[in-house]
Image (cartoon, rainbow, N blue to C red):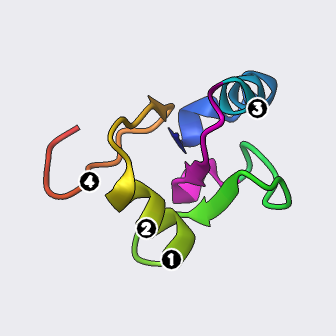
Amino acid sequence: MLVGQGALHASDEVTQVAELLGCGVAKALLGKGVVPDDEQWVTGSIGLLGTKPSWDMMMGCDTLLMVGSRLSLLGVPA
């Protein structure tokens, strides 16, 4: 799951969905405050200043749920 600024007031919901789906959560820069970094399923930021776990998760996923983000990945317009 990729969360962005639009999910800032939906931390509980993002947590529930991540736990229900058993998915990791990467955060766009402006969505950094959505969920804390110390949760085991949070991989950190994505983008130029992102983490390797977030990059690996994005490149290896077969389905991506984006919540509150318009981040364009791999040159595909959002």
Label 1 is placed on what type of residue? Answer: Lys
Q: Which residue is mark 1?
A: 52
- For marks 1 and 4 on the same chain, the one whose residue lies earlier in the sequence: 1
Mark earlier in primary sequence (2, 4): 2
Q: CA distance from mark 3 to mark 4?
A: 23 Å
State the SS at label 4.
loop
> What span is colored magenta in the figure?
21-32
> Mark 3 — residue?
15
Furthest residue in direction right, as rendered: 38
Pointer 4 residue: 73
Whole-angstrom CA distance, mark 1 to mark 4, is: 15 Å
What amino acid is labelled 3 in the image?
A: Thr
Pair 2/4: label in front: 2
Q: Report if the CB atoms under discs 3 and 4 are less than 8 Å apart.
A: no
| Secondary structure category for the residue under label 3 | helix
Q: Which residue is mark 2?
A: 55
Q: Position of residue 65 (x, y in %)?
A: 44, 31
Q: Is residue 50 visible?
A: no
Three-letter amino acid code of the residue under disc 2: Trp
Q: Residue at x 33, y 60 (%)?
A: 59
**Badges 1 and 2: C-beta atoms under 8 Å apart?**
yes
- The CA span between labels 1 and 2 is 5 Å
